Image: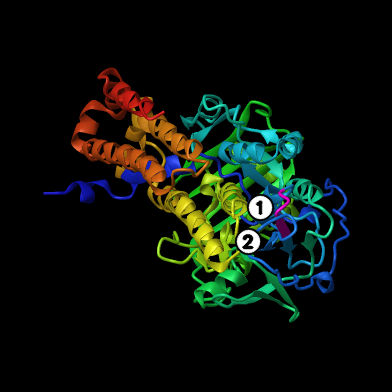
Amino acid sequence: MATPHTMLGKPALVALALASTASGLISSPGGLRQGLSAHRRPRLSRALPTASAVVDAPAATSDKVSAENPLHVVIAGAGVGGLALANAFHGVPHVKTTVLEKTSKFKRFGGPIQLASNAMQVLREMDGDMYDNIEGKATFTGNLTNGIKDGIRNEWYAMFDLKNPASNRGMPYTCVVERPDLQEILLNRLDDGVVTNAAGVSGYHQEANGPLTITLEDGETVSADVLIGADGIWSSVRAEMHNNEAKGETSGATYSGYTVYAGELDYASPDNGEVGYKVYIGPQQYFVITDIGNGRYQWYAFLAKPVGTAESDILLKPAIDTGDGCRAGNPAYLRGVFEGWAPDIHDIIRATRNDEIEQRDLYDRPPSINKPWTEGRVALLGDAIHAMMPNLGQGGCQAIEDAQVLSEVLSGLESKSSASVAEALATYKDRRLVRSAAVQGLSRFASDIIIRGFDTPAKVVDGRFENFNYAGIVTRMLQPILPVFFKIQFAFLYTGYRNEAGVKDVATGLGLLVVGGGVLLAFAAVAADAGLLLAFGVESAAGLLEGGGILETLQGVGLDFF
């Protein structure tokens, strides 16, 4: 006799994946080079000290923190998380901040980043004026129509409500901001001399009761009271802490199994101003289209491919334009990959030049439950500790949450002693560990299940059974209850953004997801009885679910979560 696990298979888990994806696959998986488009602003110009201007801090005569003897926090990396942390310390008289950035100068680089409601709320509480500047550059999508479409039939499969979960909590809507604009706002609010370019961190050394010495790539050293590694997925600070390579087989980062083609262009979408983003689902791949403001759109094609296909598949990409107007190279190749899919997909691919598309292999890390976040007076932030797939649109958002918690625990220090700093950083880890790991794990889970387990929903069309295989049947049967799980997900993401109650608070949120997943799996096990489904027809079975009060009961349970 088949057990529930053997009956379910991957398709039955799809709703958890969809719930994990619902936050919008908008955040750039690495970003597009801004030089690809002729419609970019001039490059950001900012005069900053060179590495030679970084000097050792004078030895303090006392451990007591004060405006005259400030806590010196060095941040490795001037990405979103590092700059958010520097801004969180801005105006705190007893904290001195130094940001060390590897690149020689700041350039307008990187595509749009999604700032979900939890991140926008953190930024608003961090600094109202800074939030206003970010809001002025934002394109809000959370108050528009967002959802999942059948990639073959071009029909809405499931809608998810980003508006009410935010407005009910008094939070800003989810939005998209050009990464260079966000970087410029965060940089401009810092005092001159805080950020130093051409100063990549290569390692550090700390004595138990002695100095913390940071070594730069050029051999210079910097003394500090605290070091925060915000230097990305290939973090040198993490490599030092974990005693492995920054990049390579022992680094802990692994290829996800997925490559993404990302396009960004001017595009006259017929649903501009009405739809924020659309996730087109189908067998073995999916496609995302999102409005990024000012008449510009971004799209992603997620494919399950071996690592390195940007080079190995080069001969598969047509050298001439297609007959229907797709340019040679990536556009013509993707036209074939998505043959038979919705016209919306082909329209935007056809409108995209080859030089407006970039392919990237996606890397992430498993949740760092058993890996150290801190070592003495050193801690990790953002992708350096919890790099994640882009499916939740939470990578940058979780880095911003890290920054807020770090600023709170460090600003409250009265002593810069090694023990005091280490205790504060341990508190940061305790407050952030479970929540970030949950988001990280769900992001990866979503990619695996949506690509490998999802299918075109089964449907009766003019008396014909379409796609009445196991995956299609279960996909169709899950459709009417998905809104419940979207609500549970957004409750989890938006309720715990302050990270105040640590593990207990996050465990409660995880419990909601587990309960929802358990109900879903139990339902899917029953729905998978093909004999019953064929006897009643998929449409009738879905009607029984709704008419029999099952859906109302589930929604009632879901509403109790908010």
Tag 2 near tag 1, CB within 8 Å: yes
Q: Give left or right: position of 512 versus 46.
A: left
Q: Give left or right: position of 62 versus 545.
A: right
As shown in the figure, which amino acid type bears the numbered disc 1? Leu
Q: CA distance from mark 2 to mark 1?
A: 9 Å
From where the camera sits, is residue 363 visible? no
Residue 230: assigned label: 2
From where the camera sits, is residue 508 visible? yes
Indicate the position of residue 211 as horizontal and vertical percent values: 64, 75
As shown in the figure, which amino acid type bears the numbered disc 2? Ala
**Which range of residues does the magenta coloring cover?**
92-97
**What residue lies at 73% left-to-right and 49% top-to-bottom?**
90
**113 or 494: nearer the viewer:** 494
Indicate the position of residue 21 as horizontal and vertical percent values: 48, 43
Q: Which secondary structure lies at badge 1?
A: helix
Residue 85: assigned label: 1
